[in-house]
Amino acid sequence: MNIKKLSFATLLLSSLVVSGAGSALAVSQGETIKIGNLKIVERVYENPVEYDFTDALTKSDSSKMGPLGNDMTGKVYELSKKDLYKSKSYEADIENDSNENDSFSRKVTRKTFLTGKIGVEAETKVNWRIIEGKVGINAEVSFGEEDIIETTHSWVIPKRTITTVEYGSKAVKTTGSLNEYFQGRVVDSNYVNVKYSYKEYSSKKSKDL
Protein backbone atom coordinates (compact mmCIF):
# COMPACT_ATOMS: atom_id res chain seq x y z
CA MET A 1 0.00 0.00 0.00
CA ASN A 2 1.39 3.36 -1.08
CA ILE A 3 1.03 5.82 1.81
CA LYS A 4 2.28 9.36 1.46
CA LYS A 5 3.28 11.02 4.76
CA LEU A 6 1.94 14.50 5.42
CA SER A 7 4.03 15.74 8.31
CA PHE A 8 3.67 19.35 7.16
CA ALA A 9 -0.08 18.93 6.81
CA THR A 10 -0.30 17.51 10.30
CA LEU A 11 1.55 20.47 11.78
CA LEU A 12 -0.61 22.94 9.92
CA LEU A 13 -3.86 21.27 10.89
CA SER A 14 -2.80 21.04 14.52
CA SER A 15 -2.41 24.81 14.60
CA LEU A 16 -5.98 25.31 13.39
CA VAL A 17 -7.75 23.80 16.39
CA VAL A 18 -7.55 24.81 20.04
CA SER A 19 -7.15 21.47 21.82
CA GLY A 20 -7.74 20.51 25.44
CA ALA A 21 -10.56 20.67 27.96
CA GLY A 22 -11.71 24.10 26.79
CA SER A 23 -11.92 23.20 23.09
CA ALA A 24 -14.64 24.89 21.12
CA LEU A 25 -15.50 24.28 17.48
CA ALA A 26 -12.55 24.12 15.10
CA VAL A 27 -11.50 27.36 13.44
CA SER A 28 -12.01 25.46 10.16
CA GLN A 29 -15.57 24.44 11.08
CA GLY A 30 -17.67 24.44 7.92
CA GLU A 31 -14.71 25.56 5.77
CA THR A 32 -12.65 23.46 3.39
CA ILE A 33 -8.90 23.31 3.93
CA LYS A 34 -6.79 22.22 0.94
CA ILE A 35 -3.49 20.53 1.77
CA GLY A 36 -1.70 18.61 -0.96
CA ASN A 37 -4.27 16.33 -2.57
CA LEU A 38 -6.58 16.41 0.44
CA LYS A 39 -9.61 18.64 0.96
CA ILE A 40 -10.63 18.61 4.63
CA VAL A 41 -13.63 19.84 6.61
CA GLU A 42 -13.33 19.35 10.40
CA ARG A 43 -15.80 19.37 13.28
CA VAL A 44 -14.57 19.41 16.89
CA TYR A 45 -17.26 19.08 19.57
CA GLU A 46 -16.87 20.75 22.95
CA ASN A 47 -19.89 18.74 24.10
CA PRO A 48 -19.47 15.26 22.60
CA VAL A 49 -22.25 13.89 20.42
CA GLU A 50 -23.90 10.74 21.82
CA TYR A 51 -25.19 8.36 19.15
CA ASP A 52 -25.26 4.79 17.81
CA PHE A 53 -27.07 3.38 20.86
CA THR A 54 -27.24 -0.44 20.87
CA ASP A 55 -29.29 -2.52 23.29
CA ALA A 56 -26.81 -4.94 24.91
CA LEU A 57 -29.06 -6.33 27.64
CA THR A 58 -29.06 -10.13 27.62
CA LYS A 59 -31.36 -12.64 29.31
CA SER A 60 -28.63 -13.52 31.80
CA ASP A 61 -28.11 -9.82 32.60
CA SER A 62 -31.73 -9.31 33.57
CA SER A 63 -32.26 -12.63 35.37
CA LYS A 64 -29.01 -13.25 37.22
CA MET A 65 -29.39 -12.26 40.86
CA GLY A 66 -25.71 -12.27 41.75
CA PRO A 67 -24.10 -13.46 44.99
CA LEU A 68 -26.35 -13.59 48.03
CA GLY A 69 -26.09 -15.37 51.34
CA ASN A 70 -27.70 -18.79 51.87
CA ASP A 71 -30.68 -17.04 53.40
CA MET A 72 -31.02 -14.67 50.39
CA THR A 73 -29.48 -11.73 52.21
CA GLY A 74 -27.32 -9.12 50.48
CA LYS A 75 -27.29 -6.35 47.90
CA VAL A 76 -27.62 -6.89 44.14
CA TYR A 77 -28.00 -4.74 41.04
CA GLU A 78 -30.97 -5.77 38.91
CA LEU A 79 -30.56 -4.40 35.38
CA SER A 80 -33.44 -3.07 33.32
CA LYS A 81 -31.37 -1.34 30.61
CA LYS A 82 -27.84 -1.70 29.22
CA ASP A 83 -27.04 0.36 26.12
CA LEU A 84 -23.67 0.67 24.40
CA TYR A 85 -23.07 3.89 22.49
CA LYS A 86 -20.46 6.28 21.10
CA SER A 87 -19.56 9.71 22.42
CA LYS A 88 -18.06 11.51 19.40
CA SER A 89 -15.59 14.35 20.01
CA TYR A 90 -14.08 14.81 16.54
CA GLU A 91 -14.89 14.12 12.92
CA ALA A 92 -13.67 15.22 9.51
CA ASP A 93 -14.69 14.76 5.90
CA ILE A 94 -11.59 14.24 3.77
CA GLU A 95 -11.59 14.17 -0.01
CA ASN A 96 -8.63 12.54 -1.76
CA ASP A 97 -8.98 13.13 -5.50
CA SER A 98 -5.54 11.74 -6.39
CA ASN A 99 -4.61 8.27 -7.64
CA GLU A 100 -2.58 7.49 -4.52
CA ASN A 101 -3.56 6.61 -0.97
CA ASP A 102 -2.71 9.33 1.52
CA SER A 103 -2.45 9.65 5.31
CA PHE A 104 -4.10 12.07 7.71
CA SER A 105 -2.86 12.64 11.28
CA ARG A 106 -4.62 14.64 13.92
CA LYS A 107 -4.13 15.70 17.53
CA VAL A 108 -7.52 14.86 19.03
CA THR A 109 -9.16 14.84 22.46
CA ARG A 110 -11.93 12.83 24.08
CA LYS A 111 -13.81 12.99 27.37
CA THR A 112 -13.74 10.16 29.91
CA PHE A 113 -16.62 10.22 32.40
CA LEU A 114 -18.69 8.38 35.00
CA THR A 115 -21.86 10.13 36.09
CA GLY A 116 -25.33 9.34 37.35
CA LYS A 117 -27.37 8.13 40.31
CA ILE A 118 -26.43 5.01 42.29
CA GLY A 119 -27.93 5.46 45.77
CA VAL A 120 -26.76 7.23 48.91
CA GLU A 121 -23.37 8.95 48.74
CA ALA A 122 -21.95 7.14 51.77
CA GLU A 123 -22.23 3.81 49.93
CA THR A 124 -20.93 5.01 46.55
CA LYS A 125 -17.81 2.80 46.40
CA VAL A 126 -19.62 -0.38 47.45
CA ASN A 127 -22.60 0.32 45.22
CA TRP A 128 -20.46 1.09 42.20
CA ARG A 129 -18.50 -2.18 42.52
CA ILE A 130 -21.80 -4.10 42.51
CA ILE A 131 -23.17 -2.17 39.50
CA GLU A 132 -19.96 -2.34 37.47
CA GLY A 133 -19.62 -6.07 38.17
CA LYS A 134 -23.16 -6.74 36.94
CA VAL A 135 -22.79 -4.60 33.81
CA GLY A 136 -19.54 -6.42 33.05
CA ILE A 137 -17.65 -3.43 31.59
CA ASN A 138 -15.08 -1.48 33.60
CA ALA A 139 -15.20 2.33 33.70
CA GLU A 140 -12.11 4.39 32.85
CA VAL A 141 -12.48 6.77 35.81
CA SER A 142 -13.89 6.72 39.32
CA PHE A 143 -17.53 7.57 40.01
CA GLY A 144 -18.32 11.26 39.65
CA GLU A 145 -15.11 12.04 37.75
CA GLU A 146 -14.33 13.09 34.20
CA ASP A 147 -11.15 13.92 32.32
CA ILE A 148 -9.91 15.02 28.90
CA ILE A 149 -7.43 12.74 27.15
CA GLU A 150 -5.33 14.02 24.25
CA THR A 151 -3.62 11.83 21.67
CA THR A 152 -2.51 11.84 18.04
CA HIS A 153 -4.43 9.57 15.72
CA SER A 154 -3.79 8.69 12.06
CA TRP A 155 -6.04 7.41 9.29
CA VAL A 156 -5.19 6.13 5.80
CA ILE A 157 -7.33 7.94 3.21
CA PRO A 158 -7.89 5.74 0.14
CA LYS A 159 -7.36 7.21 -3.32
CA ARG A 160 -10.32 8.70 -5.21
CA THR A 161 -12.61 8.75 -2.16
CA ILE A 162 -14.41 11.00 0.27
CA THR A 163 -13.67 9.57 3.72
CA THR A 164 -15.35 10.48 7.00
CA VAL A 165 -13.22 9.84 10.10
CA GLU A 166 -14.33 9.98 13.74
CA TYR A 167 -12.73 9.82 17.17
CA GLY A 168 -14.21 9.65 20.65
CA SER A 169 -15.16 7.39 23.55
CA LYS A 170 -17.13 4.16 23.70
CA ALA A 171 -19.63 4.33 26.55
CA VAL A 172 -22.38 2.51 28.45
CA LYS A 173 -25.73 3.67 29.79
CA THR A 174 -27.41 1.48 32.40
CA THR A 175 -30.57 1.77 34.47
CA GLY A 176 -32.07 -0.55 37.03
CA SER A 177 -32.52 -1.07 40.77
CA LEU A 178 -29.94 -1.60 43.48
CA ASN A 179 -31.86 -3.87 45.83
CA GLU A 180 -30.94 -5.01 49.32
CA TYR A 181 -32.44 -8.34 50.39
CA PHE A 182 -32.92 -9.74 53.87
CA GLN A 183 -33.98 -13.37 54.03
CA GLY A 184 -35.40 -13.18 50.52
CA ARG A 185 -37.31 -9.94 51.06
CA VAL A 186 -36.38 -6.53 49.59
CA VAL A 187 -35.74 -4.13 52.49
CA ASP A 188 -34.20 -1.26 50.51
CA SER A 189 -34.19 -0.24 46.85
CA ASN A 190 -32.41 2.57 44.99
CA TYR A 191 -32.94 3.63 41.38
CA VAL A 192 -29.78 3.50 39.22
CA ASN A 193 -29.16 5.65 36.13
CA VAL A 194 -25.51 5.76 35.08
CA LYS A 195 -23.46 6.68 32.00
CA TYR A 196 -19.73 6.00 31.69
CA SER A 197 -16.93 5.72 29.13
CA TYR A 198 -14.78 2.61 28.92
CA LYS A 199 -12.33 3.06 25.99
CA GLU A 200 -11.48 5.11 22.92
CA TYR A 201 -12.77 4.48 19.43
CA SER A 202 -11.97 5.68 15.94
CA SER A 203 -13.72 4.91 12.71
CA LYS A 204 -13.43 5.53 8.99
CA LYS A 205 -15.99 5.27 6.19
CA SER A 206 -15.09 5.85 2.57
CA LYS A 207 -17.12 6.28 -0.59
CA ASP A 208 -15.80 6.50 -4.13
CA LEU A 209 -15.64 9.82 -5.93
Image (tube, rainbow, N blue to C red):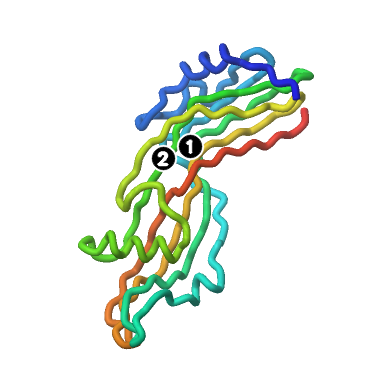
Query: Residue 126 location, x and y as percent?
Result: 29, 64
Residue drawn at x 36%, y 32% is 21
Query: Where the N terminus falls, by quadrant?
Result: top right
Residue lying furthest front in this view?
70
Query: Where the C terminus falls, by quadrant?
Result: top right
The relative height of residue 12 versus residue 198 in the rendered view (above or below) is above
Q: Which is more N-terminal, label 2 or label 1? A: 1
Q: How dense is the environment of label 1, judged by Cα within 10 Å: few (below 14), some, or many (20 and up)?
A: many
Rounded to the nearest whole Å, what is the CA distance between mark 1 and mark 2?
8 Å
Which residue corresponds to mark 2?
Answer: 111
Residue drawn at x 59%, y 20% is 32
Label 1's element? strand
> Residue type at mark 1?
Ser
> Residue type at mark 2?
Lys
Q: How dense is the environment of label 2, judged by Cα within 10 Å: few (below 14), some, or many (20 and up)?
A: many
Disc sitting over residue 72 in the figure: none
Q: Is residue 52 left or right of residue 149?
A: right
Which residue corresponds to mark 1?
Answer: 89
Question: Cβ–Cβ below 8 Å for labels 1 and 2?
Answer: yes
Label 2's element? strand
Query: Residue 122 location, x and y as percent?
Result: 20, 62
Residue drawn at x 28%, y 77% is 188
